[in-house]
Amino acid sequence: MFTPIFIRAAAVTLLFVGQLCTSEATFAAQDMRSGPTQSMSEEHQRTPCLNDTELLTDSLANETASKIQPTATSLSQKLSETDAANFALKLRISVLSQQVSTLTTELARLKDDIYRLDQKRLASSTFLHTGISKHLLSALAIAFSLVLSFFLFQRLRTSQQNDKQHLSELIAQSQHANEEMINTFSQYVENLQMLTEQSVTAAKEPALPNMEAQHALVKAIADNITFIEVTLSRMDTSVRGFKQLTKSIHQMKDRLRQSGYDIIEMLGKPYNSGMKVVANFIEDEDLEAGTQIITGITKPQINYNGIMIQSAQIVVTQNI
């Protein structure tokens, strides 16, 4: 392989030889104008110089070619190798381009998949949030209902306790009032018993001057007895003094019956349209349909020796 110094030397030599030949040619042209004879002689003299120059040039060219040939061959081989490498590189670049195109397409598909997945995730998140919100609202509603139910239960329980207490107080008050009423009735019955005995004694007289006055006394006694009986029918039988008062009333009615006066029992009996009574009717849908019951007596029916001397005035509760 030639060095830069050697190449420069060869170039200078060739340049020098070229200039020398050019000078000689110039001189030859001038001499030709001087004369033919002289030109011919000088031409013979210049011919060796030209031959020597050509020989030197050929020698340098051959030497240069012989030295340049390995380098040129090496460069040609390297150029061939470079071309092969460039071709392989182009193939590699083509393959890489195809791979890049494939990866680009795959990346676009992945982006679409990611977008769809993100949409699904967003939809799922929205649905989950909505579901959680609904469940949370349901849970809150249930909790509120439980709290409200507990509060209402406590309120109802307290109210029931208060009602029970109030009811107990009312029952106690009613019981006390009933006891006082029975005590009053007991005292009143004592007076009625005295009147009953007087009426029975008077009825035994052989000739009673005024029967109307006797009947009037019995009617007054019977009205009071009936009033007490109706009142007792609406009273609790466990009230203190109830049984004793009921027994006293039965005794008075028995004493009047012995004297011929019979007070007809009607309270709690069924009513029928054939009765000779004055009736007031009250509707009650709680009764069985078609039912008519005597629930109140203002005046009792009184028979004297089997003959009615007073018709009854009654209250009938019905559902017809």
Image (spheres, rainbow, N blue to C red):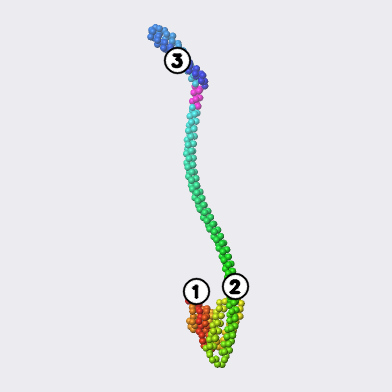
The answer to whether the residue labelled 3 contacts the one labelled 2, judged by CB atoms less than 8 Å apart, is no
- Residue on which the image places disc 2: 172
Of circles 3 and 1, which is in front? 1
- Residue on which the image places disc 1: 285
The secondary element bearing badge 1 is classed as: loop
Q: Earlier in the sequence, mark 3 or mark 1?
A: 3
* In magenta segment, residue 76: yes
| Residue type marked 1 | Glu
* In magenta segment, residue 240: no
Residue found 51% across the figure and 55% down from its top: 134
Residue 192 visible in rendering: yes
- Residue 146 location, x and y as percent? 55, 60
| Residue type marked 2 | Ala
Q: Earlier in the sequence, mark 3 or mark 2?
A: 3
The answer to whether the residue labelled 2 contacts the one labelled 1, judged by CB atoms less than 8 Å apart, is no
Which of 17/167 is in front?
167
| Residue type marked 3 | Gly
